[in-house]
Image (cartoon, rainbow, N blue to C red):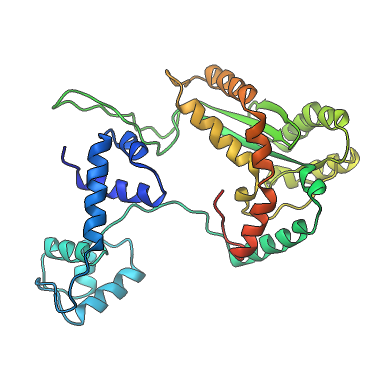
Amino acid sequence: MKIKDREKIIIAALRKENLGYSRIATHLGLKKSTVAKHCREVDRLASIILPKEVKYKGKIEGRQHLKIKQYILYNPLDTLQDIILGCDLDCAKSTLSQYLKKYGMESKVARSKIVISDVNKKKRVEFAKLMLGKTDLELESIWFSDETIVKGCPNGEIVLYRCPAGAEWFTPSNASSGKSVMFWGVISKLAYGPLVEVKGINTAATYISTLNDYLLPEIEAAEGLVTFQQDNARIHKTAAVISFLEKNHINTFEWPPQSPDLSPIENIWNAMKMKLKAMKPRPKTYAKMRDAMLEIWAGLTDKLREDLVLTFRDRLKKVLLSKGDLIKF
């Protein structure tokens, strides 16, 4: 089976994410052997070192190479025609395309990434230093909370299909992404807290109601120190919410901005959404998504939760090593 150029780009992007042949094949609807053969050939070609005297035999040569490289560095989204005009080249778009491919400057799939500002990097480093000064008991007393939205038709999701030769199948392209359900949840080293469906718009009043009805009973029933964590969502920082936390003597701390990578509950959300996606048929109505997520939450293992919460100290150390930049977890 011949692999299309678009599929080659996707394969290269997924390999950078350390996905194996099986998962890549599943994403693209290809055979594992086809993907493996293609990847091995790419690796073989990449290992070949051309003699220095070998030069590109097209119409692009000499100082134009440096000019093109510098142009692309400052204009990465420009088209082939833009590059030809910007670098004053006398060649066809096909010639330029072959040239860019030969020198590793072909078009690639852009990956989304949280870009952390220098100010917030500094805040993340300061937070990591502060928290690393605490004992294991103090870190293990943290209850990590967060909200998440589950969508029936997530934007940008890859949809795989099979059909007879000559036929095609399309996913509807709508402005909306179908039904969605919002949840609030909390986890700690000792237990999973409640998973709460948030109905309507999540306002400060709604959030306070959730904390009052579900968090307070959990804290009252807990034995020992409890430190409540919440991110910097706008409703979390309102005067009403801060007053509620203080009035009920809920111990909390300032969470650094742009830091979802530090919270273990983010990994829990990801695991749950993967389980939801794997369901056959996949729940898409409001009620079915709600019931499925509640069922998945109830079935999560204690080992998953404990292992993730215990990574918090390692996450803090990695923030220091990265000088406040985003970390992988």
Residue 322 rendering spot, x and y as whole percentages: 58, 63
Front in this rendered view, residue 280 or 71: 280
- Vertical arrangement, residue 119 with respect to residue 155, above or below: below
Among the 4 quarters of the image, the one containing residue 319: bottom right
Q: Judge from the rendering whether residue 256 lies leftward or rightward of residue 13; answer left or right.
A: right
Residue 294 rendering spot, x and y as whole percentages: 62, 22
Q: How many marks?
A: 0
Q: Say which quadrant the N terminus sits in.
A: top left
- Vertical arrangement, residue 64 with respect to residue 84, above or below: below
Residue at x 33% of width, y 34% of height: 26
- Vertical arrangement, residue 314 with respect to residue 29, above or below: below
Residue 326 rendering spot, x and y as whole percentages: 56, 57
Residue at x 65% of width, y 33% of height: 303
Residue at x 67% of width, y 56% of height: 316
Residue at x 14% of width, y 75% of height: 55
Front in this rendered view, residue 48 or 246: 48
Residue 51 rendering spot, x and y as whole percentages: 17, 75
Front in this rendered view, residue 184 or 101: 101
